[in-house]
């Protein structure tokens, strides 16, 4: 193989076109466009912003902070478990820490970051200027942030939830879940589920209605497909956890009996409702990562991913079948054997669509011309690591095997291989890939190499021994274990691996921050990629594109010849986006988006107060709901100038069409 | 199963590396049309291999599951295991109530015989798991479940609670002792006997301490005045291998430490600290030592 | 540098449309899907627990009464009319007719919500008595929430129509508001059967 050396400084492989920069409007108009889309500056402006890129960036930063916190919790657990009968952390704190680790990673990091990257990238990739409901988008972010702060405030005052991220009743119920710890958990779930549902609604409506003309369903980038499938999944899965957590909160606060067997309730009802959410949840985390991999593979092999229809079908199949697996988390309960067989079958079959995707990527790499940069390295790492997790998952689908391996470290090993290998590795690759677009600078390739290898080695050293530990009988969620069990050595190795992971993530952090100041200037399309976000400056202007590009092929930018067709005519004095028809992407109407306002932040604060109060009194809900009317009407009441202007123009338009 | 997984893994990752290694290309090397066909055929072939393999795996699974869950013969013995935070209450069923044996955290069974274990929970969800004897089965409040086990070889099998049940989930273990039929009969008949009467003044004093002190608030010793059922039955506590649900070996020193300060050994356990006069403690330990 | 070629201009396109193409319709639909699924899950929980319980309602729990709930059901069915008339007037962009029917719709909504409060007591069981009671209250509450939400929307629209000359966007909003109300009423039909009629068999 004639290996391409990875340079320290980035050298573009092909000349970069600055696409779509020649203005179809003049300088004065461009300035007005800029002012329209970024009207208020300063701190107040920052708080009021409804621009999807601002919301997306702060969402990503918040999620990364939670990733750090979750990682610190993991490090603490690994330190405690590194030796038998260690006394670093006692049972109460340990139980809080492992609960916080799971809760943080699943609710506050993994789903939000995939959501956030979608919020940033999807409008750019489909050629529009913002998401469908910008103020709602801002509300989603603030609710999420306040939810995370809420959870951590309680954790730092020794009131963190301690019943596991899955909070099985009756341990989490009113009788055995003492104090307010589990109430904090249940409410935090409400916060994050509101945020996730809002983001899902945004994604579905934006993708269905705001695509550039010509971007028919068969030409949609695979990343956008993955965001759409994920958003639909969120709408059903998050509703389920909302129902479950509200029922749990109600059982604890107002003595409902949903889960109390003595009064007709059932402890398994919680498990069904939770896992009906919990299994799709991991696919909600995984499917966006699959979309990221597809974009990276396309760009770095210089050809579209092989088998586009199969890839789309695979995404949809994974999302759909993902809802039919949940009982595999309950094989050791009293679920009937025949029912179990169905879930075994589904859990086995779901590996097929993902397998198809992997085969297609390998075929793409074979047919294309791989250019070795850090993002592609992470894709290869993803395949190598994720496959181990996928195969151990198929093993777990088998009931006789599962009843031995479930609730042991085998599952911990499996879940981290699929989540860290299957979601975090593509995520980091995606950071290296899209960082130039967001910041205008390239990350260091040399540090990227260190980042990759430290992570790759660390992940395997930490999580592979866990499979063996599980098969040797080490159960999950234990704060210590006895010497004679012989689990000490493997645990120590896993802890060493964790240290290597920390080193890898430290390199990432250094690269991330350093490159902001010293990275090579990126330009619009440093990778020579094909999707629309690369057709505007890096970072993009507040309005994303001067004119709406017309898409002519699945190959996006690569298909344009000397001239790029665009559609003009959106006003520059008001924030307007083009709404196109769902099936044919013909321009349908011009939608004026709302201006920035402080109402979403105020609303989020009131919601936070309401949910916090609901921990102690049910009156929090009606009182809070009433208070919400104030920012709600502020939000919804039309802006006077805008209203008058619309009436005038509407009148004019109606008269003109009558005369015609 | 592992073998199939490993082979699959090697094939796929091998293909990946083969594809990225054997690349000889010029900067603008067009892909030959034949290559595209070959790629299409390879992907289709891969899928056509994977699907039947998974299907066969599924059938194999169902066969094994059915085999493993079928009880080989009528159970010789039925044992009720009730999960508590954080110990296992064990009761040997018997049609004659007087013969019901109650113990904790240790089960004896005859080798080679099928034993039915009925599972219930007193508080939260626990899970019964003795890895060498069977898969896990959860103890669900409000549900009645059962599994069967059979030890084909004599030995001591360790089990551990396998569903997070609170503060001391980590220290909730139990032992299953599989022994010959004769040894098992001897053990169970001995367990049916009430506590021995104290033979000397020290053990007599110990019994008084037990009956009049905090012990009797939670524990039973058959044929004494202590008959509470909050904690484990201690009638034959000295015959058990461990204390505190597998946390400590059952020695006099450990027992003393456990009685005086359980919260250091198993913080959060429902047993409170008991401050006893040293003489009383010695008497109590002597008494408990006779409860074989 | 590649050149840009404008092939069409959209400046003549309207700034709002009626029907399933507009954003408000999609937002309403999204809300309906989410709320609907939450209620559906509560219904699944209802059947799941009913399956576990030998008698339903459980022993010593009286059957729900029919008077008030049936009244509310009829009121809801009737309330479709003013909602539909408001939507029709809105499409014709007739400010005062729309306002009148919106107000009637809002009035119906308020009455329905008030009677909904009494429907909780018509269940004849407390939310904390047993799981049957908890689920009944939960389903009634989840559905009631959607009705209350619509009433607030409607009242807001009424205020707007009184104080401002409505633009097309506001008329579209009224049509989508009615669309949401149809969802509230139609979902109530099977739920009414589930909560008040099905325990009788």
Image: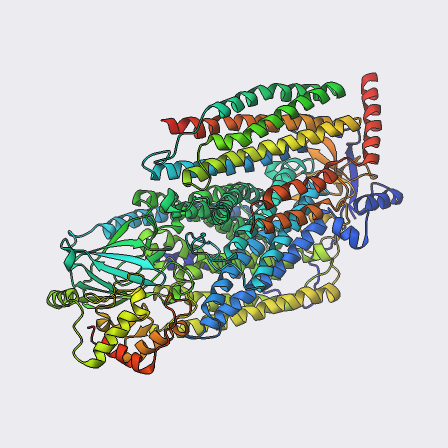
- The residue nearer to you, when weighing A144 against A317, is A144
Q: Is residue A49 left or right of residue A258?
A: right
- Indicate the quadrant containing the C terminus of chain C: top left, top right, bottom left or bottom right: top left
Q: Is residue A347 visible?
A: yes
Residue A266 in percent (x, y) is at 38, 45
In the displayed structure image, the side of residue C114 where residue C17 appears, left or right = right
The picture quadrant where one finds residue A104 is bottom right
Return the residue nearer the eye: C101 or A78: C101
Residue at 66% across / 47% down in the picture? A606
Where in the figure is residue B180, as x and y percent of width and height?
A: 13, 67
- Regarding residue B38, the answer to whether it shows in the image is no
Does residue A229 lie above or below B246 as drawn? above
Q: Residue furthest left?
A: B182
Q: Which of C15 and C45 lies nearest the eye of the viewer?
A: C45
Residue ranking furthest to the top: A659
Q: Residue furthest bottom?
A: B279
Q: Position of residue B131 (x, y in %)?
A: 29, 62
Numbered-mark total: 0
Above or below A85: residue B192:
above
Residue A155, x across and y down, in percent: 56, 62
């Amino acid at each position: 193989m004639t290996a391409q050396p990875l340079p320290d400084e980035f050298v573009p492989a092909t000349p970069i076109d600055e696409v779509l920069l020649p203005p179809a409007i003049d300088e004065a108009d461009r300035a007005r466009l800029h002012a329209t889309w970024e009207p208020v500056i300063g701190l107040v402006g920052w708080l009021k912003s409804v621009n999807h890129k601002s919301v997306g960036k702060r969402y990503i930063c918040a999620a990364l902070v939670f990733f750090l916190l979750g990682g610190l919790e993991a490090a603490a657990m690994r330190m405690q478990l590194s030796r038998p009968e260690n006394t670093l952390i006692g049972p109460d704190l340990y139980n809080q820490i492992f609960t916080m680790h799971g809760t943080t990673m699943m609710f506050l990091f993994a789903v939000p970051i995939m959501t956030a990257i979608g919020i940033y990238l999807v409008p750019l990739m489909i050629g529009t200027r913002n998401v469908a409901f910008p103020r709602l988008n801002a509300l989603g972010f603030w609710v999420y942030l306040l939810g995370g702060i809420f959870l951590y405030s309680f954790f730092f005052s020794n009131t963190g939830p301690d019943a596991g991220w899955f909070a099985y009743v009756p341990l989490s119920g009113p009788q055995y879940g003492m104090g307010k710890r589990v109430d904090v958990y249940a409410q935090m779930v409400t916060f994050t589920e509101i945020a996730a549902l809002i983001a899902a609604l945004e994604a579905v409506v934006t993708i269905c209605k705001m695509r550039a003309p010509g971007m028919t369903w068969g030409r949609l980038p695979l990343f956008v497909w993955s965001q759409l499938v994920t958003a639909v999944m969120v709408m059903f899965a998050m509703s389920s956890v909302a129902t479950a957590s509200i029922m749990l909160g109600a059982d604890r606060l107002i003595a409902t009996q949903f889960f109390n067997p003595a009064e007709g309730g059932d402890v398994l009802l919680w498990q069904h409702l939770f896992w009906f959410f919990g299994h799709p949840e991991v696919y909600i985390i995984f499917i966006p990562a699959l979309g990221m991999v597809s974009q990276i593979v396309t760009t770095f092999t210089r050809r579209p991913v092989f088998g586009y229809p199969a890839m789309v079908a695979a995404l949809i199949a994974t999302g759909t079948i993902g809802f039919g697996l949940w009982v595999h988390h309950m094989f050791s309960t009293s679920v009937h054997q025949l029912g179990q067989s169905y879930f075994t079958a589904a859990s086995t079959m779901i590996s097929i669509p993902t397998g198809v995707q992997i085969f297609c990527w390998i075929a793409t790499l074979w047919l294309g011309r791989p250019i070795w940069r850090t993002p592609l390295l992470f894709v290869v790492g993803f395949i190598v690591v994720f496959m181990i997790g996928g195969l151990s998952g198929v093993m777990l689908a088998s009931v006789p095997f599962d009843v031995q391996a479930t609730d042991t470290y085998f599952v911990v090993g499996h879940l981290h291989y699929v989540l860290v290998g299957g979601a975090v590795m593509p995520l980091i690759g995606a950071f290296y890939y899209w960082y130039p677009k967001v910041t205008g600078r390239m990350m260091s390739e040399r540090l990227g190499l260190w980042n990759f290898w430290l992570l790759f080695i660390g992940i395997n050293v930490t999580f592979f021994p866990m499979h063996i530990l599980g098969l040797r009988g080490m159960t999950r969620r234990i704060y210590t274990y006895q010497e004679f069990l012989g689990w000490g050595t493997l645990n120590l190795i896993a802890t060493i691996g964790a240290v290597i992971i920390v080193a890898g993530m430290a390199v990432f952090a250094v690269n991330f921050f350093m490159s902001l100041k010293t990275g090579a200037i990126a330009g619009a399309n440093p990778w020579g990629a094909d999707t629309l976000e690369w057709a505007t400056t890096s970072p993009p202007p507040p309005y994303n594109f001067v004119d709406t590009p017309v898409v002519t092929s699945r190959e996006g930018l690569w298909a344009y010849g000397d001239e790029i067709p665009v559609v003009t005519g959106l006003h520059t004095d008001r924030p307007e986006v083009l709404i196109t028809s769902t099936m044919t992407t013909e321009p349908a109407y011009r939608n004026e988006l709302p201006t920035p306002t402080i109402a979403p932040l105020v609303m989020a604060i009131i919601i936070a107060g309401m949910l916090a109060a609901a921990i102690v009194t049910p009156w929090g809900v009606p009182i809070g709901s009433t208070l919400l009317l104030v920012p709600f009407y502020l939000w919804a009441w039309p802006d006077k100038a805008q209203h008058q202007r619309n009436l005038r123009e509407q009148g004019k338009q109606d008269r003109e069409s009558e005369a015609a | 199963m592992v073998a199939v997984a490993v082979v699959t893994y090697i094939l796929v990752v091998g293909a990946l590396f083969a594809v990225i290694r054997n690349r000889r290309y010029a900067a603008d090397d067009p892909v030959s049309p034949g290559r595209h066909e070959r790629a299409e055929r390879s992907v289709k072939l891969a899928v056509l291999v994977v699907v039947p393999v998974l299907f066969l795996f599924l059938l194999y699974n169902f066969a094994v599951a059915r085999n493993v869950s079928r009880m080989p013969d009528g159970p010789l013995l039925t044992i009720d295991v009730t999960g508590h935070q954080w110990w296992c209450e064990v009761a040997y069923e018997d049609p004659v109530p007087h013969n019901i044996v109650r113990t904790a955290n240790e089960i004896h069974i005859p080798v080679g015989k099928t034993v039915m274990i009925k599972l219930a929970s007193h508080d939260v969800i626990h899970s019964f798991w003795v890895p060498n004897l069977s898969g896990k089965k959860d103890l669900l409040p409000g549900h009645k479940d059962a599994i069967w086990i059979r030890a084909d070889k004599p030995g001591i099998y360790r089990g551990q609670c396998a569903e997070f049940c609170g503060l001391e989930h980590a220290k909730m273990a139990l032992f299953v002792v599989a022994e010959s039929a004769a040894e098992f009969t001897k053990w169970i008949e001995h367990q049916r006997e009430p506590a021995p009467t104290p033979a000397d003044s020290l053990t007599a004093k110990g019994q008084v301490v037990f009956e009049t002190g905090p012990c009797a608030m939670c524990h039973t010793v058959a044929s004494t005045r202590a008959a509470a059922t909050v904690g484990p039955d201690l009638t034959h506590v000295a015959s058990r291998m461990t204390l505190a649900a597998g946390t400590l070996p059952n020695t006099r020193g450990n027992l003393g430490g456990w009685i005086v300060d359980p919260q250091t050994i198993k913080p959060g356990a429902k047993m409170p600290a008991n401050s006893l006069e040293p003489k009383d403690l010695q008497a109590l330990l002597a008494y408990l030592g006779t409860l074989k | 540098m590649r050149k840009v070629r404008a092939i069409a201009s959209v400046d003549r396109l309207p700034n709002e449309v009626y029907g399933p193409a507009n954003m408000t319709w999609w937002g309403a639909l999204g809300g309906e899907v989410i709320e609907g699924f939450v209620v559906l899950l509560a219904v699944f929980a209802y059947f799941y627990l009913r399956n576990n319980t030998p008698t339903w309602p459980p022993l010593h729990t009286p059957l729900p009464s029919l008077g008030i709930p049936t009244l509310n059901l009829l009121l809801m069915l009737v309330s479709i009319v003013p909602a539909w008339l408001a939507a029709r007037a809105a499409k014709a962009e007739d400010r005062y007719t729309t306002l009148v029917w919106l107000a009637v719709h809002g009035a119906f909504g308020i009455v329905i919500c008030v009677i909904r409060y009494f429907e909780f007591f018509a269940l004849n069981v407390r939310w904390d008595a047993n799981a049957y009671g908890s689920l009944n209250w939960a389903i009634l509450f989840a559905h009631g929430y959607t009705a209350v939400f619509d009433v607030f929307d409607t009242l807001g629209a009424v205020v707007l129509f009184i104080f401002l000359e409505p633009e097309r966007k506001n008329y579209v909003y009224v049509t989508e508001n009615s669309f949401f109300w149809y969802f509230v009423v139609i979902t109530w039909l099977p739920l009414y059967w589930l909560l008040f009629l099905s325990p009788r068999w």
